[in-house]
Each structure stands twice: as structure tokens, then as C-alpha cells.
Image: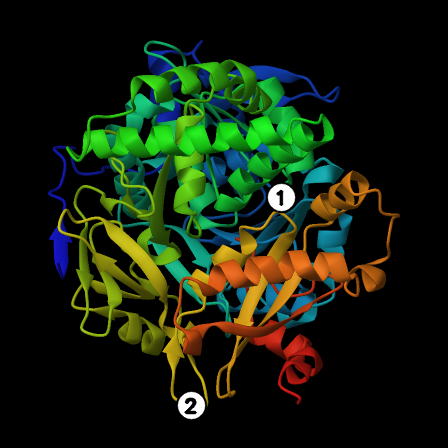
Amino acid sequence: MREFTNPPSALEPPVGGLADVVFRYAEEDPARIALGRKDDGGRWRDVSSAEFRDEVLALAKGLLAGGIRFGDRVAIMSRTRYEWTLFDFALWTIGAMVVPVYPTSSAEQCCWMLYDAEVTAAIVEHEDHAMTIATVIDRLPRMRRLWQLDAGAVQELYDAGAHLDDDVVHRHRQAVTPDSVATILYTSGTTGRPKGCVLSHGNFMYEADTVIERFEPVFHSRRGDEASTLLFLPLAHVFGRMVQVAAIRGRVRFGHQPQLHAAALMPDLAAFRPTFFLAVPYIFEKVFNAARRKAEREGRAGPFEKAVDVAVRYADAMEAKAWGDGPGPSTALRMQHQFFDKLVYSKIRAAMGGRIRHAMSGGSAMDRRLGLFFAGAGVHVFEGYGLTESTAAATVNPPELTRYGTVGQPIPGVTVHIAEDGEIWLRGTNVFEGYLNNPEATDATLDDGWLATGDLGSLDEDGYLTITGRKKEILVTSGGKSLSPGVLEERVRDHPLVNQCIVVGNDRPYVAALVTLDQEAVEHWLTMRGKPAMSPAELVRDADLEAEVRRAVVTANTLVSQAESIRTFRILAQPFTEEHGLLTPSLKLKRRAIEKAYEDEVDMLYRA
């Protein structure tokens, strides 16, 4: 199939702006709980619709008093926290545009984004961020104000705007339309300078409302309970921003967690007890691997692996039944599944707060077997696909008929087209207006309403999309063999000791790989085998560890022809990190940056 369209829903066209629902919901049901917020003691407390409305209004007044005007562009540089959401809606209330900046951005990256967007003011989280911007402030002629969250910016603005009438704010809010620009979101980009995606209030409202209408039942743990989610994705990324907007518009109670690390995230999941969450595959992998390590420490590695096998076979059988391709799980499999639900699966759900029954995954591809495992363990993960340019999700697996290993069908109102070269094209109301100050890039990406994604994929006979790679990431060996590295990298990463894998081989005689290790998994592996602690330099030379990684490579090679297989590999002592410019904030590999940083190691792979 070359093209599939999901007809639009019966939703009314968006009107007004994103902040309107904050005021409408507070008027309709002021006591309803809108958000959860951690107090100074680390305890979660509820924030009602009326409280949130009052805080947004007071902050909007302060921003006006501080010189922010309708149409101004204001940067936010922070981790995911309550104040970011507060500033977003306050700025949208007065018709300002938000320019998100990743908290790990360098001074030069900040300078480019703030200069290109002609930012007039910025909100930063702490002094380090303030100093980062201060080093380039002489190159930002339009910058007039800088507020720091950890230095009392919110209260300062409350006080500054206290003398203003509410009507002043509402006159600004009523001037906002769906065509008004809500945010200029700079693509993190695996190559080249970030481009500013111009996204309107209408883009976000259409996207959020469509997803809410289609997926609202899966927001709940069981029928009739209060929907809640914990937002831990970066709010500087389109996925996190869409979750925020959808939670507010969908009346979903949500809280913020600033660290996308399992060690920090798991305690907050247990305390906040969300009914569903949205994440990247990395989080699901970490939950699974942590459960496996715990079982091994307790001497239950065998039963755990059996439980994994049962969960995968159970979910696979349920999927086949849903598609009319099988009778469903056998009686024996159902009994095994019931047994392991008490022994294993319930504990995994408890680690995620105990109430989660559904989740959504995006940002990168999830392994089919991992998705089946979570479904068999009682957490149905709906995988989707989208870009900054499509205001997040363009396709998602429908809740009633999931096809694991795919990223689902187009959301209502979106068309997916597969071009002759396999590139995925998208069309719909959620597609952006273009790149700021970059008509050449806009013309190269948008053609008569079609968004050329740069991703490669295929559509099956039911309109389900499978991602097969990136056009720019296709490797061509010196022998002329073309391959997409993603399938090999994902399979190598399936090994619990492997953190990251990058396949190389462009203009080289054969395919090779650089591999990094999961430090927590390696420490566990050493303990379980009675080996002493080792330094990173010692680990990469350990013969047993190399044999483990080699097994992962051999397994990955079974997926491709001999000419496409990984001939040799090198284990690196340190992981690729965002701080060193080797990962995007959504944890994608920056291939050119990695190959440049490790050019000596890559050269060693091809020396006789």
C-alpha cells in the first residue's frame, strides 16, 4: 500500500487559543484537581482548576508589567517542572510565543536559537543557565529581561503585576486565534544547525483534541476512575509539550518529574500512581532490565525468563485472535499466565505505581518482543510515530486493534503516503507552518501541504506504518551494498549489557559497530559472576564481557545478509551522552558527531 488516510473526526474546528480552557474549566468546575505538584518536603499536593487559573492570571499580569507584549517571543530554559507549564499558559494567555530551550544546550546553541527567534526575554531554571546566556548576551540585541526560577521569578512577577486589572489580561487572551503562533520549537537534529519549527495554537489544539477523543478510554486504569499521568519527557521536546497540552485540555491530572532516569523516575511513579503514561522506549527497556536484574539477584532468573516467554506468547496469541488469525491463548497458557501474573507481572506494575494499564511510546522504535512482554504483563503500550513538524503524533496504534512492531495507523485527519524511494510523507491539520527564517528548508520539506519526513517506511494492507530507517542514515559500503543501520543497532541493544550501538561502514569495505555498556547492568553482571569491580578501561578488555557482546552481534547478524552483517566491533569505555553532544535530547544518536569524536576508534576497526 502506498497511501492511507484516516478520515477526520467529528470534532469542532479549534477556536481561540490554548489558554482559554484554563479559564473555562476553572469557571465550570473550580474544585476539580488539574495538576499535582511537589511541595518543599517532596510530597505531592493537588492543584485545583481554580488555583491553576489564578496562578496563570497572576503570572500573566506580571509578564505584562515586565514588558512582555502580544507577539513577543520568550524563551524557557529548564527541566520539566510545574513552573514551565505555568509560564507556558501565562505566555499563551497574553499572546506571546514560547521558544523552548533544552536545559543541556551549550552557550553557542542558546545564542543561535535566541538570536534566530529574536527572543526579547528568557526564563531560566537556575544560575548555571543564567550564566550560559550571560556569556552570549552581547550577541542578542533584542534580549531585555532574564528571570530565574530558582531565584524567585514567579513571586517577583506576581508582585509586579498585582496592580493590573484582570480585564487587561483577558483582552490579550481574546485576541489569540488558532492561527496565532504558540511556539517556535527548535529541532534537536541529528545533523546540522537546529531549525525553528513554527507551530500554531491550532496545530496543538487539533493534535491534542484528536488524540483525546481517540484514546481517552486508555487514560484510565479502570472505568470511571480519575485519569492521571506523570510527565517526565522534556518540555523542550514536542512530545512533552503535546502531553502537557493534551492533559490540560483532556482534564487529566498530571505532575512533573524533571529527570528522565529510571533511578529518579521510579520512586515518583510509585508515589504519584498515574493511570497511564507516555514515554520513549528507553524507559520501558529500563523497567524491564531492572526487573530482570532483581530476579537474578534473588536467584529467580529461570522463573523470570519463563514469565517473559509466557507473557510474550500470551500477548502474541491475543493479538492473533484480535486479527482473526487464531483462537487466542490455550487453556494451559492462560493458567501459566495467571500464575505468573501474581508472581512477576503484578510486581512490575507495582513498580510503576500499581495503577498503570496503558502507556504510549514514541520518539524511536520499540522492539516488538518488548511490546508483547508489557502487554502480556498487563500494561498495553501503544506505539506511535511523529515529528516536531507534525506536532508530535502522526500515527498511533489504535486501542482496539494493536499491531505490535508497527507505529500504527494515521490519527484521524492525517494521511500517510509512501514515496517512490520509500520516504514517509504526511498531510494533516497538525502539520507545521514552516521553519522560521528558513524558506529554503521549508520548501525542501513542505510540498503542496505534504511533509517529507526524511524517514523511510512501509504501509501494510490495513494502513499500519512500519519505520525502516532514515534516508540520511543509509550506509553504502565501498562495495556498493546499501543498508539501514537501525535494525542491527536495535537488535544489539536488546542485550541487557549493551547501552548503545552505532553501526558504521559508509564508504568502507564492510560493516562494523561501536558499542557502549549499561553500567548498572555490568555491575550486576560482575556481582552475579563473582568478578571484582573493574574500571571502564579494564571492562573493555575483559574476555568474558567481549564474548557477551559478540553474542549480541551474532544474534543481530541473523536479521541481515552476510554482506550487511557486522564483521567486527569495539566496546567503548564511556557512553554517548547528550552533554558531550553525541545524543539528541530525545536520546537519538548524532551519527556524524559520534563518528567524528571516535574517528580513531572507527579507523581501528578497518585496520588489517
Q: Nearer the viewer, residue 419 or 64?
A: 419
Q: Does residue 507 sit above or below 300 in this rendering?
A: below
The answer to whether residue 587 of the structure is visible from this angle is no
Q: Residue at x 28, y 28 (%)?
A: 318
Q: Nearer the viewer, residue 162 or 271?
A: 271
Residue 261 horizontal/vertical position (percent): 64, 41
Q: How many marks do you count on the picture?
A: 2
Q: Residue at x 53, y 63 (%)?
A: 554
Q: Which residue is mark 2?
A: 479
Residue 338 horizontal/vertical position (percent): 43, 15
Amino acid type at circle 1 is: Arg
Task: Give SS at disc 1.
Answer: loop
Residue 79, numbered label = 1
Amino acid type at circle 2 is: Gly
The answer to whether residue 346 of the structure is visible from this angle is yes
Residue 136 horizontal/vertical position (percent): 69, 68
Q: From the viewer's perspective, is 183 left or right of 262? A: left
Residue 66 horizontal/vertical position (percent): 59, 44
Q: Nearer the viewer, residue 142 or 464?
A: 464
Residue 365, numbered label = none
| Distance CA(mark 1)–CA(mark 2) | 46 Å
Q: Does residue 336 sit above or below 576 in this rendering?
A: above
Q: From the viewer's perspective, is 515 left or right of 392? A: right
Chain-order first, disc 1 or disc 2: 1
Q: From the viewer's perspective, is 59 left or right of 405? A: right
Q: Residue at x 77, y 39 (%)?
A: 528
Q: If the image is split into quadrants, where does the N terminus sit?
A: bottom left
Q: Is the residue marked by circle 1 packed among few (<14), some (14-19), or many (20+) residues within 10 Å?
A: many
Q: Which residue in the rendered view is the most extreme toward the front?
A: 332
